Image (spheres, rainbow, N blue to C red):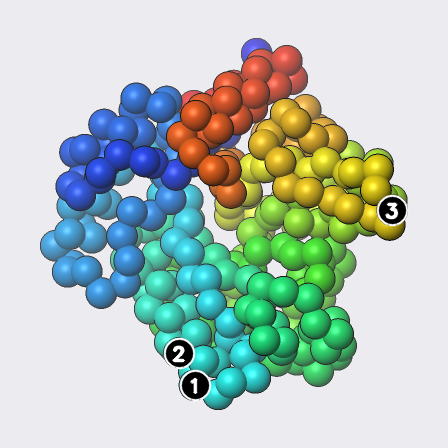
Amino acid sequence: MVEARLRLGAPIFDDCGDPDTWIGALRRKGYTAAYCPLQAGVGDGLVRAYEKAAAEAGVVIAEVGAWSNPLSPNEDERRDALCKCQEQLALADSIGARCCVNIAGSLGQRWDGPHAADLLPAAFDLIVESVRAIIDAVKPSRSYYTLETMPWMYPDSADSYLRLIEAVSRARFAVHFDPVNLICSPQRYFDNRRVIQDFCRKLGSRIRSCHGKDVAMDTRFLTHLDEVRPGLGHLDYRILLQELARLEPDVPLMLEHLPGEEDYDLAAAYVRAAAHDAGISFC
């Protein structure tokens, strides 16, 4: 068994209104990584208390979500989104989270939906501008701002992420890996092993957190891809875990988008079994 120091985490369904109950809930599930349990605006004392509890329990705070649309065509929504991203990045830096994560945003009406303009050069330039504005306003020293990979907006591949990193040109801009979100065609679906390897080998040193889920393709015409629980789809988890194990210690794999606690328990059991089969251990 290879001691890779990978970490597994998922949403917690217990009432975690104080650090001790939060840590207790994580321990009962065997998780050593966690989503940040706080939102921007809480007092500094509470932030310090959760940070201390995590450190003492050996728990890594994987990410702070900043889910919003910094590219919105609505000026008020766009301004509010930039403010939210800055506040959540400041929280991530304060509590010592590995990253603050958002999607790039959309020029359409749905913040996370497809729009023809989102893959044009002008959208790329707006993403660069918004990411710089977020990082430059906060000047984080411990955490990083990251964009989750997506199927229909940048970054939508390892190469487009590399282009963004070069264009943004900020040391505190890093990578959030969601392999399922990159599986947006039959070609990528059947060759997802190569997609995973290509991404990790080009961007591995910059990956701060990774989302864990799975993807299944229906036989209906035309192409229908669905997000499913890990183990119920076609994603090559053995390869994913092996590639994550090559990265720096403590990279967290965070389960998401499941309907309930039992589903997360089943997903965690599958991922742990896949890791065992691959000769990899979670810390």
**Are circles 1 and 2 on residues that touch, CB within 8 Å?**
yes
Q: Which mark is drawn over residue 221?
A: 3
Query: Mark 3 or 1, which is nearer the eye?
Result: 3
What percent of the width, then of the height, locates residue 9? 43, 34
Mark 2 burial class by Cα count in 10 Å: few <14, some 14-19, many 20+: some
Is residue 201 something that shows in the picture?
A: no
Instruction: Say which quarter of the image contains residue 45.
Output: bottom left
Q: Is residue 138 left or right of residue 282?
A: left
Q: Quadrant of the C terminus?
A: top left
- Left or right: 126 as drawn, with respect to 30: right
Amino acid marked by disc 1: Asp
Q: Residue at x 57, y 15 (%)?
A: 273
Q: Residue at x 72, y 77 (%)?
A: 117
Q: Position of residue 180 (x, y in %)?
A: 66, 43
Quadrant of the image containing the N terminus: top right
Give residue 195's mark: none
**Mark-to-mark CA distance, 1 and 2:** 6 Å
Question: Where residue 280 sits in the image (x, y, percent)?
Answer: 57, 19
- Residue bearing mark 2: 80
Q: Are marks 3 and 1 in contact (CB under 8 Å)?
A: no
Label 2: element kind:
helix
The answer to whether any part of residue 71 appears in the image is yes
Q: Residue furthest front?
A: 220
Which residue does the numbered mark 1 point to in the structure image?
A: 76
Is 248 left, or right, of 202 in this rendering?
A: left
Q: Nearer the viewer, residue 251 or 130?
A: 130
- Which is closer to the viewer, label 2 or label 3? 3
- Give the residue type that dot 2 points to: Asp
Mark before the other along the chain sequence, 3 or 1: 1
